[in-house]
Image: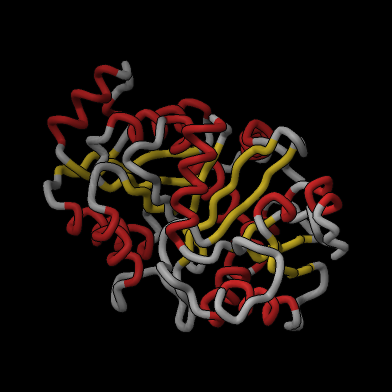
Amino acid sequence: MFRNFDEISQYLLDNQIKKTIVLCGAHDDAALAALVDARRRGVAEGILLGQEEEILKLLDELEEPATNYEIVGMHRGEHAINLALDMVKAGWADIPMKGLMKTASFIWGLIDKERGLCEPGRKLTHTTAWYYPERNGFMFASDTSFIREPTLEDKVQIIENAIELLRAFGMEEINVGVLSAIEDVKDNIPSTVDAQKLSEMDWPDGIHVDGPFALDNAIDPHSAEHKGITKPMAGHADLLLLPDFLTGNVLYKSIHFFAHLPIAGTVCGAIPAIVTSRSDEEDTKYYSILMAILQSIYQEKHRL
């Protein structure tokens, strides 16, 4: 089981695993720097789609030869994602990545019925992973970007999508903590009702879903004990199921800006795709590349 991003990087290198990332809107300094870093470390190759003059300028500033990449000049983000998806389907690239372009255009491309990568009957979700020093390992949360107000059925799919990613990280026993503001079931707080229903469902072996939990007693055993919460999973959640994407957005940015913890995100429910925030730094985008590659090789072994 991987415990930090350095272990993932070393695993990819030890097994000579390398994937081709097609960067849409490659005239983005942080995204391009992350891809250049991944190439230099030997875990990725890159195809760059975007404003060619600006891409060449950024590569020069990074002291990176432009000849190391295929560069396609494009000025419209929706054209870039369409070409990127065509490249993935043709086998010329493995993972699309969002650079400097509108998130909505990138996502609409992913779910497009003709070009898109979303599997029939599945919704795209976004899962975040971060290194949690108190456990010397990873924690996960979903959905952090896509589904605004998930229904009970959506939450089932969010869990199912995320489980595949956690399996890629080598996790066999997975505790899913369903979050709300309180630990009691209240009819006037729908997230608590959903949590109870989810905890009563049948899940595959090794998957333990329980809730509702507040954030503190989902991840901290002392908080759970202090509040008298006796559920076996209390304080031991690996995956946090969020009540809505607003909560996910705040959690994601709090981990980054307040706690300054190593963090990454990837799309689940299709082949991997990297959707990072414009405010994310190079490290976050690089870690997201690592996570997407790990997800990709897991899918190759278990689903394709």
Q: Between 146 and 69, which is closer to the camera in this rendering?
A: 146
Quadrant, the C terminus: bottom right
* Residue 276 as seen in the image, left or right of residue 71: right
Q: Is residue 246 visible?
A: yes
In the image, residue 144 sits, relative to residue 59, either above or below, namely below
Q: Quadrant of residue 255?
A: top right
Q: Residue at x 29, y 29 (%)?
A: 29
Q: Residue at x 40, y 59 (%)?
A: 91
In the image, residue 223 sits, relative to residue 42, either above or below, namely below
Q: Quadrant of residue 231?
A: bottom right
Q: How is the image coloured?
A: secondary structure
Q: Between 220 and 300, which is closer to the camera in this rendering?
A: 220
Q: Between 91 and 146, which is closer to the camera in this rendering?
A: 146
* Residue 273 as seen in the image, left or right of residue 156: left
Residue 140 in picture, x, y percent from top left: 62, 52
Total marks shown come to 0
Residue 87 in picture, x, y percent from top left: 32, 58
Q: Between 214 and 73, which is closer to the camera in this rendering?
A: 214
Residue 69 in picture, x, y percent from top left: 31, 35
Q: Residue at x 71, y 70 (%)?
A: 184
Q: Quadrant of residue 172?
A: bottom right
Residue 183 in picture, x, y percent from top left: 70, 65
Q: Residue at x 39, y 46 (%)?
A: 276
Q: Is residue 163 visible?
A: no
